[in-house]
Image (cartoon, rainbow, N blue to C red):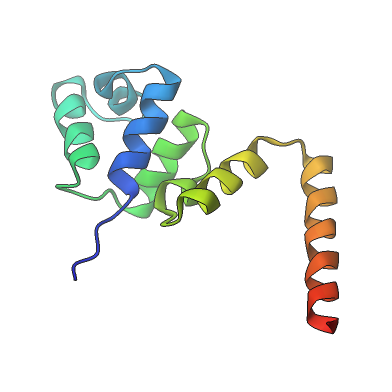
Amino acid sequence: MAYESCFPSRLKAARKKKAISQTELGRRIGLDSQSASARMNNYEKGRHQPDFNMAKNIAEQLDVPVAYLYCECDEMAELILTFYKLASDQRKRILLEVLELQDTNQQN
């Protein structure tokens, strides 16, 4: 069975949530206006995959972590996105709680 990347659908959803066009996103990441829409369309259709640096630039413009764009599991993707949106002190507190929970589970 062939692997189908989740990147195209996550990219499209994040772009739409941010309410920007493919052309605008392409321009924001440094593509020229002539090819911006076609290039972003190819990424969203899964015809091409951006290299990691390009994906990172895209993620920054969409205000999502790059891991969110690549995450295979929907629940994990939502967790990554939610965690990313938290303040630093909240992230630290949650991480400590998760680590404590993991320790408790390993002891049982």
- Report which quarter residue 9 is drawn in: top left
Position of residue 33 measured from the top left corner of the image (x, y, whole percent): 20, 20
Residue sitting at x 33%, y 25%: 25
Relative depth, front residue between 82 and 64? 82
Relative depth, front residue between 30 and 90? 90
Image check: 75 left or right of 6? right
Residue sitting at x 16%, y 39%: 42
Residue sitting at x 81%, y 41%: 90
Relative depth, front residue between 33 and 18? 18
Image check: 45 left or right of 19? left
Q: Farthest front residue?
A: 108
Q: Farthest bottom residue?
A: 107
Residue sitting at x 32%, y 30%: 30
Position of residue 100 measured from the top left corner of the image (x, y, whole percent): 86, 66
- Report which quarter residue 23 is drawn in: top left
Looking at the image, residue 61 lies above or below residue 24: below
Q: Looking at the rendering, in which quadrant would you find the C terminus?
A: bottom right
Q: Looking at the rendering, in which quadrant would you find the N terminus?
A: bottom left
Position of residue 81 measured from the top left corner of the image (x, y, whole percent): 57, 41
Number of numbered labels in the structure image: 0
